Image: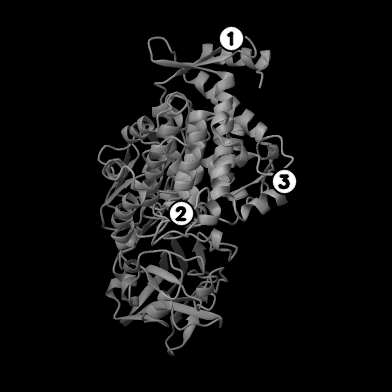
Amino acid sequence: MKISGAVILFLFLLALSSTHTALGQKTRKIEVRVLRDKIEAEWVGQMIGNIYGLPHEGKYINAPGAETWPYGYTKNLDKLKKYDGAFSDDDTDVEYMYLLQMMKFGAEPSYTQLREAWMYHIRDRVWLANRAALGLMHFGYTPPFTGSKALNPHWYQIDPQLINEIWAVTAPGMVSYAASKSDWAARITSDEWGVEPTIFYGAMYSAAYFETDINKLIETGIKALPANGRFAATAKEMIDLHAKYPADWKAARKEMAQKYYIDEPDMTKTIWNANLNGACAVLAMLYGGGDFQHTLDLSCAIGFDCDNQAATVAGLMGVINGMKGLPENLYLPVDGWKKPFNDKYINITRYDLPDGKISEMVDQSLKTAIALAVSKGGKLSGKPGHEVLTINTEAVFNPPVEFCLGPLPQMETGKPVDYNFYTEANKVYNWSLVAGTLPAGLSFTKGKLTGIPTVAGYSKVTLQLENGKEKITHDFNLLVRNINIAPSADTILANVRQLNEKVLDSCWYTFGKSMYAKNVDVINDGKTTGPGSVFYSLAAKSKIPKVDYYGYGWKTPQKISMIALHTGCLEEFGGWFTSLNVQYINEDGKWMPVEKILITPPLPKTDIVFFQPHFVEYVITFNTVETKAIRIIGDAKIQDHWNKYTKQVSGFTSVTELSVYH
């Protein structure tokens, strides 16, 4: 690719206007033609790894794959012929979507902009943490709340490490920047140690533009991790296993699987666990010894969610060695193709995501990488065709200034409040209250709401966030409730009182068994997350439409005007209400509907699983009733599912808490 004179002039002026300077700082230089070659090899390498690994996904759990290498594309060769090029999957399509956002908004798009892209382009074919994040986005939350451990029960799964390589691909040699940005982006879907393999890969990808030794790259990745984090310890253990069994990858794999799968705690034991699959990738790289084909086959044979490791590690190998390091038979597997994957990337997974020419995807990534490097204190020099990019290796990632929107404080009169509006992404910026009146008894300082509220009701306030250059505001409607009277109830009302564990065990459920409470009594224990917090109204298997209800009874009449439903974790095959109403017992002992019901926020407008949020609260208000019993009631979704074991499961709902207020 040749950079035009106009582009060179623009980037030169951008460098001059930058507030950063490379003077006195460490720099690295790379020829633009070399940079482009490595970016091309990264994209092509990821496509090879993803398509090559897909037939092995989830096949090797109890034992590794056989050494019948090379595995080859097997059945996916027919798909390559069908589409006459590479085809999209979740290992590459989200990154392509992210690249398009960088082309639209610049190299540092905001959480808000990425959320909009998710909600528009991603309408199916996402699972685990990605699906949970998408449901929370449609509920109204933004990252990082969409990946928060408190809201996204899949926070520890593999999802972020397979969709975020693009941030490091476009940050060559800026290792700290790439690691921080990868961390920031990983929190769209995940939290705590669930994001650590993503940081690890981000550092390695960025460093690989200037380092070819895989062992040194692994060390670079470890150094970028939290020193006392889980994955740093795991990666070091993989190095030790390789040293213990230098010629026996199966022995190392066996010990790794014992500790990080078989003996993994119940709440995080899945074949998609981020730490487990990150460990698999480290072993594949160590035993692969820098050889592309051998590393690729090992990525598949070591198993678990292996297509993701294959894609990420193959992309990394592409950055290390460029196109000359990729086996030609893997990117030209079809007779007649002259360019890698026939220069086609066919979208079969995302709504309204355009098909792409691989060469154009590479050029777009190159343009973004150059612009980012220049904006961070680097410079572009040299004549057309011989340009050299100078990179400030000490570049720092500062997240865009924006409000991160998640659950507002759940406040009750007379109870202390200590709530942060900020997250780690915007903690460093200045906060102020610029309009509205806080609830009586509360104060706001540096992004924190504290005090003891004294009066129930709503209070509208406007907060301002600024960093010395930008100022933005956002309106919040704060609710103070009266004291929750659910714990004082004499009776819990429910049509299903006990979880049918046999039915649950017949399902393809995705959470640790200890997540599920055995009876409905947990809905007023004040616990909304963790082991034993979630009640599933699973009864006998049935495809008959089902109505669920939950409520309370008291010996003496209560005045009630509000109920808050806190949902639990959901499955791909159900768990949510498709309608919701409130009924109370009148003086004649009959169930009657309340009047002027309002659900905030409204239930999703669709029953599609990708719009359903985990662990959220719906506040239901209505005209005050005086009654000895009240309940919510609605239809439980019966969701068709691809898995044969869940096709006949009855409709059910998932609840953690049901609160009631005067």
Kind of residue at disc 3: Asp
| Figure quadrant of the C terminus | bottom left
Rate crowding at label 1 as few (under 14), some (14 to 19) or many (20 or more) other CA atoms within 10 Å: few
Where residue 247 is drawn, which disc sits there? none
Is residue 488 visible to the viewer in this orientation of the structure?
yes
Contact? badges 3 and 1 (CB < 8 Å): no
- Decide which of tag 1 and tag 2 comes sooner along the chain: 2
Which residue: 39% across, 80% down? 502
Circle 3 residue: 84
Residue 169 falls left or right of residue 96: left
Question: Residue 302: where, in percent of width, then height?
Answer: 41, 52
Q: Which residue is mark 2?
A: 305
Tags 1 and 2 touching, CB below 8 Å: no
Residue at 52%, 48% in the rendered image? 70
Color scheme of the displayed model:
one colour
Q: Earlier in the sequence, mark 2 or mark 3?
A: 3
Instruction: Give the x, y percent position of residue 492.
Output: 34, 79
Q: Secondary structure beneath disc 1?
A: loop
Mark 2 neighbour density, 10 Å: few (under 14) some (14–19) many (20 or more): many
Question: Alpha-carbon distance for marks 3 and 1?
Answer: 38 Å
Residue type, mark 1 in image: Gly
The amino acid type of the residue labelled 2 equals: Asp
Between the residue at mark 2 and the residue at mark 3, the CA separation in whole angstroms equals 26 Å
In the rendered structure, find residue 382 and report the number of the disc placed on it.
1
Q: Is residue 236 above or below residue 106?
A: below
Left or right of residue 60, residue 333 in this image: right
For this view, does 93 lie left or right of residue 420?
right
**Category of crowding for the residue at label 3, using alpha-carbon neighbours closer than 10 angstroms: few (below 14), some (14–19), many (at least 20):** some
The answer for how far apart the CA atoms under marks 1 and 2 are is 45 Å
Q: Secondary structure at mark 2?
A: loop
